[in-house]
Image (spheres, helix red, strand yellow):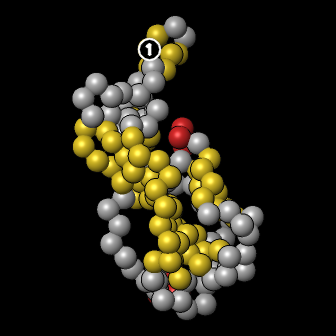
Amino acid sequence: MSRPKEPAGGVESRQKHQMENSGCGARTLLAGCLGKQDLLTTAIEGDVVPGAKAVTHMDEGKEFLHPDSVGADRKHTFKVICLNADTGKILWEQTAFEGTPYDDRHRKSSYASSTPATDGKLVYAFFGTEGLLPTT
């Protein structure tokens, strides 16, 4: 299988704008449906919440915790941020969830890894166990 061709403009065209983001997540260009906008989902990890922990997983009757599971013991803020694709200016930002997640995530992933989608009216962002959250 061959590697996909680099878009016109190379890596620089994909990194046109940089912004400070204390979380980690996914960024996607939605051209046409909502105009030329970049949508960014982010999961910002906060402090440990005493007593908070992930749901218990069972495997063949025994409690199971994956060795790379992290996150459910901390407060998180999940956000959707909309940027102007040409200028990088923030058009709007909405907090979709704030609190402790129901379940852990893999340490090399993010609660905000999924690509947001739109029907032209609403933006839908999926944040793992916290669910599918529509924003305007």
Q: Position of residue 92 (x, y in %)?
A: 50, 72
Q: Is residue 133 above or below residue 29?
A: above
Number of numbered callouts drawn: 1
At horizontal 39% and vertical 79% (from top left) the residue drawn is 18
Residue 68 in view here: no
In the figure, is residue 107 to the left or right of 60? left
Residue 32 in view here: yes
Q: Position of residue 54 (x, y in %)?
A: 41, 28
The residue where tag 1 is placed is 63
At horizontal 27% and vertical 34% (from top left) the residue drawn is 49
Which quadrant holds the C terminus?
bottom right
| Quarter of image, res 60 | top right
Q: Position of residue 81 (x, y in %)?
A: 49, 67
Q: Is residue 46 above or below residue 26?
A: above
Q: Position of residue 23 (x, y in %)?
A: 36, 58
Q: Is 66 in front, or is 53?
A: 53
Which quadrant holds the N terminus?
bottom right
Callout 1 secondary element: strand
In the figure, is residue 100 to the left or right of 126? left
In the figure, is residue 130 to the left or right of 105? right
